[in-house]
């Protein structure tokens, strides 16, 4: 039962976290997966099948833009994603919503102390 709740709670923050990871520089999918794992202390262990639908949706909403790198020797072409100005505004708004929600949850959870 805990697994199901954890997955649902995490799913609600993926867009915000991906935008945050792209805030400073463009990254390709595997980089995003690795950085999310490392920076979250392994709380977020994404698989390709979880990340790419998020990236495609954010790209469709013009919150990120994707560009393919050229091939360089043995290195294959990779699609790099970068945050757009609209994505920066959305990240700010999502962060404000997150703060309000997490603050409200915290107040309820600590209410009986």
Image: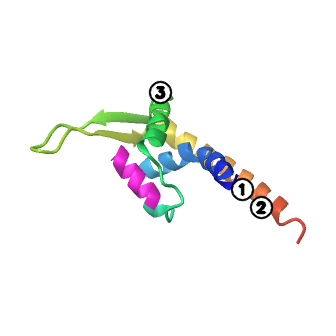
Magenta stretch secondary structure, dominant: helix
Residue closer to the observer: 101 or 88 = 101
Q: Which residues are magenta?
A: 27-37
Distance between the alpha carbons at the discs numbered 3 and 2: 34 Å
Q: Secondary structure at mark 2?
A: helix
Q: Is residue 23 visible?
A: no
The residue most toward the top is 60
Q: Is residue 36 magenta?
A: yes
Disc number placed over residue 102 in the picture, else none: 1
Asked whether residue 81 is drawn in magenta, I would say no
Q: Residues within 10 Å of mark 3 (few under 14, many from 20)?
A: few
The tag earlier along the polypeptide, 3 or 1, is: 3
The residue pinned by badge 3 equals 60
User: Do tag 1 and tag 2 residues touch (Cβ < 8 Å)?
Assistant: yes
Specify the farthest residue to the bottom.
113
Element class at badge 3:
helix
Residue that label 2 marks:
106
Residue 59 occupies quadrant: top left
1 or 64, which is in the foreground? 1
Q: Nearer the viewer, residue 51 or 1?
A: 1
35 over 47 or under it: above or below: below
Q: Do callouts 3 and 2 mark residues in contact (Cβ within 8 Å)? A: no
């Amino acid at each position: 039962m805990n697994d199901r709740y954890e997955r649902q709670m995490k799913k609600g923050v993926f867009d915000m976290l991906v935008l945050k990871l792209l805030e400073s520089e463009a990254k390709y999918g595997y980089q995003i997966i690795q950085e999310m794992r490392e920076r979250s202390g392994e709380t977020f262990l994404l698989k390709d099948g979880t990340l790419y639908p998020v990236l495609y949706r954010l790209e469709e909403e013009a919150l990120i833009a994707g560009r393919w790198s050229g091939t360089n020797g043995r290195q294959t072409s990779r699609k790099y994603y970068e945050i757009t100005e609209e994505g920066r505004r959305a990240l700010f708004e999502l962060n404000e919503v997150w703060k309000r929600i997490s603050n409200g949850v915290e107040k309820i959870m600590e209410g009986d102390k």
